[in-house]
Amino acid sequence: MNDGDTLDLAPETAPAEVEKSGFWGKLKKGLFMTHTEFLDRLDAAVEGRSVMDEEMMEHLEEILIGTDVGVETALEVIDSVKERVRGFEARDVLKLREMLVDEMAVLLLDAPQPVVRTDQPTVTLVVGVNGVGKTTSVAKLARWSQERGERVVMAAADTFRAAAVEQLSLWGERLDVDVIKQAAGADPAAVVFDALQAAKARQADHVIVDTAGRLHNKEHLMEELSKIKRVVDREAASWQRRTLLVLDATTGQNAISQAREFTRVVEVDGVLLAKIDGTAKGGMAVAVARDLRLPVIFLGVGETADDLIEFRPREFAKALLG
């Protein structure tokens, strides 16, 4: 899905303003279904009321749960809002939305943020179950790095699925990015070794590794990822390393359960929330931060390689709530 926004920009428009316009366009389009439904239900909840009473708070709690933030998160947000609404009229919807944005932003910002360094190459392991958009997310990350002037190498280490290797190879051709691969069924750690050697030879800045997603076989997955990490530790000891978990935003609370299972198998630094493209509820980003203590790093907001944006907690909360 393309951004679709046509911007009539004057020559003096600052680059930061252009970037922000693109960010907002993609984010609002991705969360369109959520914030439209939220606003409609919020208007219905306050209609005919003169004060923000307990019954209205219960309605608001149900509305929040409907955005996929989760029951416990919704309760926490409502409890915080209750302390602030005394004296406000129910029809002051704008003020109520501002309070909700504040509370959600606090929860999103509370998750520990990974330290990012720009003075050394990076290895990013991309993990997630099959079907969440993991391989496409690898390609989007590659494009994101390219836009920052980085030289990228992608490693097709999901050797269990021949289709994943083929898909990543096609993305490599489209993006003009080197893809290091071996035959189907090869040792994933060997693919990563080759990718790191290639990256060193080509003076690459970023190696992005597509890994297998066989969560149903935890022991095998843990062993596989452990071997990959040992290779990275040995061959890229001075490089920055991170592990991103890809979650499908359209699966709502099921994705939270999935993430919880993955964090028991592998240490995760952050989340890439895929498929924020008009059908996802979006609120699960708040549940990821609050329940799992994992920061959302990126959002996939469409189907093209350019449809990846960095996560900005407050802007996300504002877009989520209309």
Image (spheres, grey):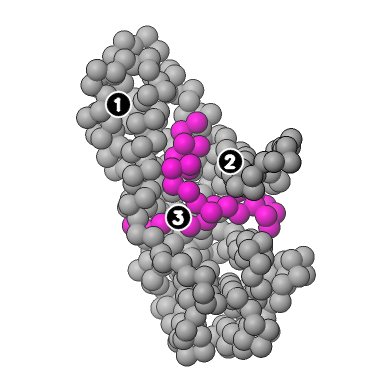
Q: Which residues are magenta?
A: 293-322
Circle 3 residues within 10 Å: few <14, some 14–19, many ≥20: many
Q: Is residue 12 above or below residue 167?
A: above
Mark 3 = which residue?
A: 296
Q: List the residue tagged with mark 2.
A: 24
Quarter of the figure with residue 82: top left
- Residue for point 53% across, 54% down: 310
Q: Is residue 166 magenta?
A: no
Amino acid at the residue labelled 3: Val
The residue depicted at 22 percent of the width and 30 percent of the height is 83
Mark 1 to mark 2 CA distance (whole Å): 31 Å
Q: Is residue 36 above or below residue 303?
A: above
Q: How would you rate the neighbour count of disc 1 (Cα within 10 Å): few for under 14, some for 14-19, many for 20 or more?
A: some
How far is the residue under mark 2 from the one under mark 3?
17 Å
Q: Are marks 1 and 2 in contact (CB under 8 Å)?
A: no
Residue 306 location (% of width, % of height):
67, 55
- Whether 209 is drawn above or below 175: the answer is below
The answer to which of marks 3 and 1 sits earlier in the sequence is 1
**Which amino acid is tagged 2?**
Trp
Locate residue 216 relative to residue 15 in the image: left or right: left
Q: Is residue 136 left or right of residue 101?
A: right
Q: Nearer the viewer, residue 26 or 121?
A: 121
Residue 125 place in picture, x, y as percent: 51, 72
Label annotation for residue 205: none
- x and y percent of residue 35 in the render? 51, 32
Label at residue 58: 1
